Amino acid sequence: MEYFVGIVLALAIAGLAAGCGFYRDRSFGPTVLIVIAAYYVLFAVMGSSGRTIVVECIAAAGFVLAAMIGFKASPLLVAAAIASHGLFDFTHYLFIDDPGVPHWWPGFCGTVDILLGASLALLHMRDSRTPQAPGVPRG
């Protein structure tokens, strides 16, 4: 069920981002990535583990750094980082013991992250191939 809900939510977010043009704002993807990365810190706090909070903060810092670099360099880098967070979701339990993570979270969030990252990448690649008249903003 978590995969189904993840698919529906990812498509809804991507559709909203495309329909409203949110994805065109350079801060959209990085902000999404930072929020996504913060959830594991929240789960560590809920699990009341000081060591795990530190480990999750370090992991989150890597994604925050990717968001900052991607913001300056390329929205495709941000999209790839969002999708890579999905891979992180599916392998998280192998590296970090976080008792606060709900059992359904990796499947749900991993699905959202991979589909949303792929959707944002496709939207940005489509925009980069679409000819634009000089002085006419996209939108």
Image (cartoon, rainbow, N blue to C red):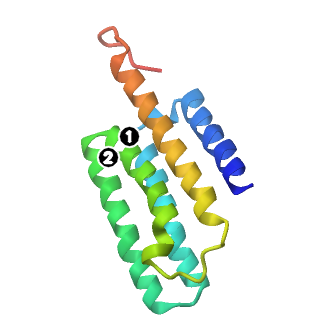
Q: Position of residue 43 (x, y in %)?
A: 57, 76
Residue at horizontal 34 percent and vertical 22 percent from the top: 128
Q: Residues within 10 Å of mark 1 (few under 14, many from 20)?
A: some
Q: Is residue 36 above or below residue 138?
A: below
Q: Is residue 134 above or below residue 9?
A: above
The answer to the question of whether label 2 and label 1 lie on touching residues, with beta carbons closer than 8 A, is yes
Q: Is residue 91 above or below residue 7?
A: below
Residue type at tag 1:
Arg
Q: Residue furthest right?
A: 1
Residue type at tag 2:
Phe
Q: Position of residue 9 (x, y in %)?
A: 66, 46
Residue at horizontal 57 percent and vertical 37 percent from the top: 14
Residue at horizontal 36 percent and vertical 61 percent from the top: 64
Q: Position of residue 34 (x, y in %)?
A: 44, 59
Q: Provide the residue designation for mark 2.
A: 71
Q: Is residue 30 above or below residue 37?
A: above
Label 2: which secondary element: helix
Lower position in the chain sequence, tag 2 or tag 1: 1
Q: Nearer the viewer, residue 24 or 121?
A: 121
Q: Provide the residue designation for mark 1.
A: 26
Measure the alpha-carbon separation of dots 2 and 1: 6 Å
